[in-house]
Image: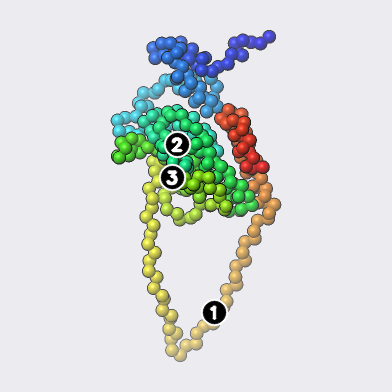
């Protein structure tokens, strides 16, 4: 015999009922609670949490002093402020929808012709982020067998909102960073989003831009140093009457032997399987459709 109590699907209706029951002053009817119930269900699913009264209450009750003070930057949804691997862009539309409408997002990894995104708005993943994910997938495929790019990761993150004087609104940038925390686009061109990479774009040393900072989320560009004029050194004169010492030729250092192909292929294969496993987890959690999962996995087969 099936237990009706346990078989009940806990969705929007269930959450609306609990909001109306336990927070009746704020939600006097189930209808008035339906919009908030949708938001709560979306948040719990994104976090992989169960629909329980405890988890619902946690999202309703706001601790004292948590609201931003006047002039203080509004907070973006917490997952957006943490660097994550590029395929997590599939979750960005949901996370942006859970952000206050005081914040506007300027995506540096989306086609140029698209407008900025207001927090709380509903956007399509295929419009804003699919082109960059496809580009990154191609880069990963190109990096197979490349020793220098085995540990390379394409991470995405949102910067802390800054108030733009011209528009008088809070704006956050959606950017790509390397594992060292430095902002870099890895060759992706927003003006030509359909461009297919032909070589692996690794993060160069000494490029402009400062390290992504977890507190400020700001990347002020560094001013490149001007090279000093190097004057040719004058040859040293040998003292008169002294025979110049013979210099013993230095023995050239042996170059480090390249890693065997088997080691490289093994690491690439482990990385490929790890990415496929994560894509399948996203499908099982309902974050992407079956078609999107098959398309993303096909890049690694």
Quadrant in which the C terminus appears: top right
Could you tell me if residue 83 is visible in this image?
Answer: no
**Coordinates of residue 18 in the picture (x, y in percent):** 48, 13
* Residue drawn at x 46%, y 16% as measured from the top left: 34
User: Of helix, strand and loop, which one carries label 2?
Assistant: helix
Q: Which residue is mark 2?
A: 81
Quadrant in which the N terminus appears: top right
User: 64 or 178: nearer the eye?
Assistant: 178
User: Of helix, strand and loop, which one carries label 3?
Assistant: loop
Q: CA distance from mark 1 to mark 3?
A: 49 Å
Q: CA distance from mark 2 to mark 1?
A: 59 Å
Could you tell me if residue 196 is visible in this image?
Answer: yes
Q: Which residue is mark 1?
A: 247
Q: Which residue is mark 3?
A: 212
Q: Could you classify mark 3 by the number of other residues whose Cα lies within 10 Å: few (under 14), some (14-19), or many (20 or more)?
A: many
Q: Could you classify mark 1 by the number of other residues whose Cα lies within 10 Å: few (under 14), some (14-19), or many (20 or more)?
A: few
* Residue drawn at x 51%, y 34% as measured from the top left: 125
* Residue drawn at x 61%, y 53% as measured from the top left: 146
Q: Earlier in the sequence, mark 1 or mark 3?
A: 3
Q: CA distance from mark 2 to mark 3?
A: 11 Å
Q: Earlier in the sequence, mark 2 or mark 1?
A: 2
In the image, taking residue 294 as reference, residue 97 lies left or right, namely left
Q: Is residue 120 above or below residue 161?
A: above
Q: Residue furthest right?
A: 262
**Coordinates of residue 86 in the picture (x, y in percent):** 53, 40
Q: Could you classify mark 2 by the number of other residues whose Cα lies within 10 Å: few (under 14), some (14-19), or many (20 or more)?
A: some
């Amino acid at each position: 015999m099936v237990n009706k109590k346990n078989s009940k699907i806990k969705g929007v209706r269930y959450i609306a009922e609990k909001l109306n029951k336990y927070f009746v002053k704020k939600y006097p009817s189930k209808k008035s609670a339906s919009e908030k119930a949708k938001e709560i269900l979306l948040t719990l699913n994104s976090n992989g949490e169960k629909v329980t009264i405890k988890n619902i209450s946690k999202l309703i009750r706001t601790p004292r002093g948590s609201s931003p003070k006047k002039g203080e930057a509004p907070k973006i949804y917490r997952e957006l402020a943490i660097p994550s691997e590029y395929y997590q862009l599939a979750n960005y539309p949901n996370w942006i929808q859970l952000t206050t409408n005081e914040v506007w997002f300027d995506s540096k990894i989306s086609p140029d012709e698209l407008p900025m995104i207001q927090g709380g708005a509903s956007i399509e993943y295929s419009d804003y982020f699919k082109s960059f994910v496809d580009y990154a997938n191609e880069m990963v495929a190109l990096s197979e067998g490349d020793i220098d790019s085995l540990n390379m990761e394409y991470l995405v993150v949102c910067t802390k909102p800054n108030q733009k004087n011209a528009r008088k609104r809070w704006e956050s940038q959606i950017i790509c960073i390397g594992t060292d925390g430095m902002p870099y686009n890895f060759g992706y061109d927003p003006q030509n989003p359909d461009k297919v990479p032909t070589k692996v774009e690794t993060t160069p040393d000494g490029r402009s831009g400062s390290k992504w900072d977890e507190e400020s989320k700001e990347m002020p560009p560094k001013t490149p140093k001007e090279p000093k004029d190097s004057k040719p050194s004058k040859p040293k004169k040998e003292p008169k009457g002294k025979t110049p010492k013979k210099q013993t030729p230095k023995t050239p250092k042996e170059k480090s032997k390249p890693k065997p192909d088997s080691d490289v292929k093994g690491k690439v294969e482990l990385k490929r399987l790890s990415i496929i496993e994560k894509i399948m987890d996203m499908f099982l959690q309902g974050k992407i459709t079956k078609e999107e999962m098959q398309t993303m996995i096909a890049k690694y087969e």
